[in-house]
Image (cartoon, rainbow, N blue to C red):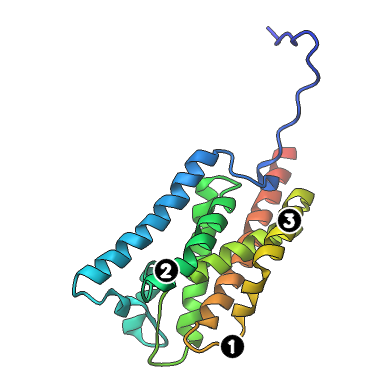
Amino acid sequence: MPPVPTPGAGPAKPARPAAKRVLPPQPLAAAIVAASFTVLLYVIELIDVILPMNLDNGGIVARQLSGLDGIAWAPLLHGGWGHLLANTVPVLIFSFLAMARGIGPWIAVTATIWLVGGIGVWLTAPPGYVTIGASGLAFGWLAYLLVRGLFNRSAAQLAVAVVLFFVWGGMLWGVLPGQPGISWQGHLFGALGGVLAAWLTAKSDRRVGTGAAA
């Protein structure tokens, strides 16, 4: 039996396509994931401070096979509380907004940024340095959020990108060399990973849409 419209109710507003959403479909779950990841970073830093393990040596060491596994661990490690605090707000906000397509797609986006950023650092960072920190992820999520509206042709996502650029656009200077002790390679390749992730997800959405229409 077809549903009977409620008297006086207007036409139902069509749901925004997943590819063009600007906020997570399940905000509470997304907030819990973003907060949990951030808490994990603090737990790891606390362990590094309390125990004589020197976890920071587990970061990426450029062009050394022994430093290749650092790609998996580098974003989880930080060179002190100040380093971690500087990354906290961007990680929280960008990771939350990047879950607009859902938590599953966010994992794929994050994995792309993580891998592209890590490989880029391993290939280009100065020899002998250990690269750590979640800033590469933050740059990747920011770049993803800035360009996804272009690939998705979404005015709402472009509006969000304008706000993000106004507030955090100054971060993008971090992709350029010149700041001692700052891994511009991690920032640059993290951002490139974010752009790649936005392009791949938009391409996947268009392919699914074409298949559904056939």
Image: 6 above or below 187? above
Residue, disc 1: 177
Classify mark 1: residues with Cα within 10 Å, few (<14), some (14-19) or many (20+). Answer: few
Residue 16 pos. (x, y %):
71, 38
Residue, disc 2: 84
Tell me: 9 left or right of 102.
right
Q: Looking at the picture, which amino acid does disc 2 mark?
A: Leu
Tell me: 72 left or right of 28.
left
Residue at figure coordinates x 35%, y 82% from the top left:
67
Query: In the picture, which quadrant includes the C terminus?
Result: top right
First-in-chain label (2 vs 1): 2
* Camera-side residue of 188 and 17: 188
First-in-chain label (1 vs 3): 3
Residue 22 pos. (x, y %):
67, 47
Q: Is residue 12 visible?
A: yes
Query: In the picture, which quadrant includes the N terminus?
Result: top right
The quadrant in which residue 158 appears is bottom right
Classify mark 3: residues with Cα within 10 Å, few (<14), some (14-19) or many (20+). Answer: many
Q: Which disc number belongs to residue 149?
A: 3
Residue 100 pos. (x, y %):
60, 47
Tell me: 2 left or right of 69.
right
